[in-house]
Amino acid sequence: MAGGIGVALLYRGLAIGVMSVVAPVTAVCAVIIPLAAGVAMGERPAPIAMAGVVLAVVAIVLVSQSGAPASGRRGTTGAGIAVLSGIAIGIFLVFLERTGPSAGLWPLVTARIASVSLLALAAIPARERLVLRRAAMPLVLGGGALDMLANIFYLLAVRQGPLSIVATLASLYPASTVILARLILHERLRAVQLGGVICATVAIVLIVAA
């Protein structure tokens, strides 16, 4: 359920906000949750990692500063939704780490069944279409396949390395998202938001370097 909620909020944020803001904020929040869980379970991040967490909070504040040049489709950057999405995704990453190697890839199967069922039930009262348009099928199927592949790689990696490090590395995806947003959607950032994106990137690097 956490994974389904996190992804739904992420897609909502991308739909109404600025992609190059939503992606980094989601990633930073998704990093902090597994990092805190790792500490609670006995992992001891170096001081440089804690500095990265502080910088991540600064990044969220900076990147959340909305303005006309960076407004999304509905006049918002989508930063608030991105924070909630990141928290839910972070919880999902922690839950996956707690599954044992003997479970194989079945945790991903059950997680996907739970998330699809949850979203389908939520769509009924909202009167949303449950059948996709044929033109959207290639994008949806391609995105879904890449998403599942990413989850498989994460599950395999987190069973071999520390949760705090693996989850952080998995959250480096905003780099490609920002590049695609600039190339395809021609999104532009205010100076303060660009500083926030840079801080988010540096924060992730600091945590990984610990």
Image (tube, rainbow, N blue to C red):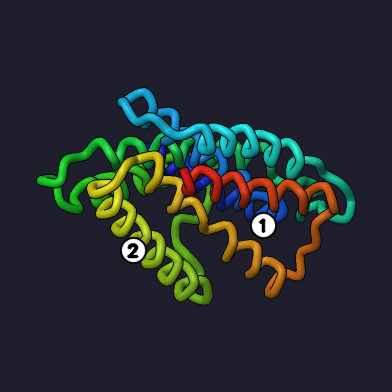
State the residue lying farthest toward the right: 68
Residue drawn where x is 80% and y is 41% of the image? 65
Q: Is residue 59 above or below residue 201?
A: above
Residue drawn where x is 54% and y is 32% of the image? 50
Given residues 180 and 45, the one toward you in this image is 45
Q: Is residue 24 visible?
A: yes
Given residues 49 and 199, the one toward you in this image is 49
Say left or right for 37 vs 172. left
Residue assigned mark 1: 19
Residue 143, given in percent of the width and then of the height, sits at: 45, 66
At label 2, counting other C-alpha atoms closer than 10 Å, the crowd grade (few under 14, some 14-19, many 20 or more) is few
Q: Which mark is residue 149?
A: 2
Which quadrant of the figure has residue 178? bottom right
Q: Is residue 56 above or below residue 24?
A: above
Lower position in the chain sequence, tag 2 or tag 1: 1
Residue 61, given in percent of the width and then of the height, sits at: 73, 36
Q: Is residue 123 visible?
A: no
Say left or right for 49 vs 192. left
Q: Amino acid at mark 1?
A: Met
SS of the residue under disc 1: helix
State the residue lying farthest toward the top: 40
Residue drawn where x is 67% and y is 66% of the image? 181
- Quadrant housing the N terminus: top left
| Residue at mark 2 to residue at mark 1: CA–CA distance | 22 Å
Residue drawn where x is 31% and y is 59% of the image? 153
Q: Which mark is residue 117?
A: none
SS of the residue under disc 2: helix
Residue 196, given in percent of the width and then of the height, sits at: 73, 46
At label 1, counting other C-alpha atoms closer than 10 Å, the crowd grade (few under 14, some 14-19, many 20 or more) is many
Q: Amino acid at mark 2?
A: Leu
Residue 69, given in percent of the width and then of the height, sits at: 88, 55
Say left or right for 46 vs 115. right
